[in-house]
Image (cartoon, rainbow, N blue to C red):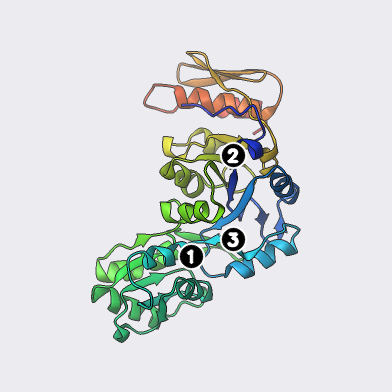
């Protein structure tokens, strides 16, 4: 397996970009420097854009407002949240007006209502489903009501299964951790709507009308695995949490189609990464595997060198991953 080649810029080769937010479009309160211009250029090239996030607590309007405030023009209808994917998943199974117990925040409640379902808060209202999404205001009472309803037979849906949420004070429990309370109490595992599962990306494809979508993200285990699950091409950007070492050591389902430093990669062609039998070449670089180590020779664009190292490691048939630290050090990575 190796990275794909595109002789055209990706914003011309694919008709829609499904963009993750944190680490891709913004980091904390600020835009990733390359992001606003790259998104503008993608739109100008005819590429449709959807902002796809596992965040279920904020409404699309609130997220669009935040994006616009940092220089990324966005409309609410371009924002696709895991809350919306979860609500659609339930609406496809139950008739309009059905009661759904919401264990979460405003974004989740509004998403349920927009799908023609009736948000409720108590198990005595006999909800057909319980939907749980991240909320910093989640209470024990909400968890109790959700547990009672799931124990009584309600469908259990989680907006996403992220174990942690990176917030201002550090890493904190995410919805995947919080949903384990109901799951542990009832012995019922939730149906998950968010990345890396299909419903959220399906919602993005539906929203954009894409025939050839490109999933763009900074996380291997959500964004890239989600693209793999759906059979879509993917672009990993290294502006977020994934390091070059993480990328090289990725398992098959976490390996992207393309890689770039940041969203500027949407506007670039992506060179061929060619397998050689004992390694791989890209641009002016050759990576070869010998005695369980990767050697890197050549010169040129550092990203081409990283591509060559990825291809060499991913193609190596040995059961153990060859050591590649020296190769990355040669690239200053």
Image quadrant where residue 286 sits: top right
- Which residue is depicted at the point 65% across and 45% down? 47
- x%, y% of residue 234? 54, 40
* CA–CA distance in space, label 2 to label 1: 24 Å
Residue drawn at (68%, 60%), measured in percent from left and top?
74
Helix, strand or loop at label 3? It is strand
Cα distance in 3D space between marks 1 and 3: 10 Å
Q: Badges 2 and 1: C-beta atoms under 8 Å apart?
A: no
Residue 212 pos. (x, y %): 53, 41
Q: Sequence-wise, which precedes: disc 2 or disc 3?
A: 2
Label 2: which secondary element = loop
Relative image position of residue 59 (x, y in whole percent): 57, 70
Answer left or right for 137 relative to 317.
Answer: right
Q: Which mark is residue 14?
A: 2
- Circle number at residue 84: 1
State which quadrant residue 316 falls in.
top left
């Amino acid at each position: 397996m190796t990275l794909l080649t595109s002789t055209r810029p990706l914003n011309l080769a694919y008709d829609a970009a499904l963009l993750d937010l944190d680490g891709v479009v913004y980091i904390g309160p600020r835009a990733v420097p390359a992001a606003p211009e790259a998104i503008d250029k993608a739109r100008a090239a005819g590429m449709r854009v959807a902002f796809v996030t596992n965040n279920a607590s904020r409404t699309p309007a609130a997220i669009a407002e935040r994006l616009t405030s940092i220089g990324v023009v966005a409309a609410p209808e371009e924002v696709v949240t895991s809350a919306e994917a979860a609500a659609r998943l339930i609406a496809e199974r139950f008739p309009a007006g059905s009661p759904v117990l919401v264990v979460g925040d405003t974004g989740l409640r509004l998403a349920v209502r927009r799908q023609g379902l009736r948000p409720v808060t108590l198990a005595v209202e006999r909800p057909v489903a319980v939907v749980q999404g991240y909320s910093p205001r989640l209470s024990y009472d909400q968890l109790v009501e959700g547990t009672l309803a799931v124990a009584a037979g309600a469908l259990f849906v989680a907006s996403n299964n992220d174990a942690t949420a990176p917030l201002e004070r550090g890493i904190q429990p995410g919805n995947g951790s919080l949903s384990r309370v109901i799951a542990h109490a009832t012995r019922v595992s939730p149906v998950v709507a968010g990345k890396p599962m299909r419903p959220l990306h399906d919602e993005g494809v539906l929203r954009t009308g894409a025939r050839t979508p490109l999933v763009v993200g900074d996380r291997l285990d959500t964004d890239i695995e989600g693209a793999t699950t759906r059979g879509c091409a993917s672009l990993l950007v290294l502006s977020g949490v994934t390091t070059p070492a993480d990328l090289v050591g990725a398992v098959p389902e976490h390996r992207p189609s393309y890689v770039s430093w940041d969203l500027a990669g949407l506007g670039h062609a992506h060179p061929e990464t060619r397998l050689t039998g004992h390694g791989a070449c890209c641009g002016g670089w050759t990576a070869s595997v010998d005695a369980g180590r990767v050697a890197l020779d050549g010169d040129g664009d550092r990203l081409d060198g990283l591509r060559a190292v990825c291809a060499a490691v991913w193609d190596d048939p040995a059961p153990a991953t060859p050591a590649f630290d020296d190769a990355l050090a040669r690239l200053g990575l």
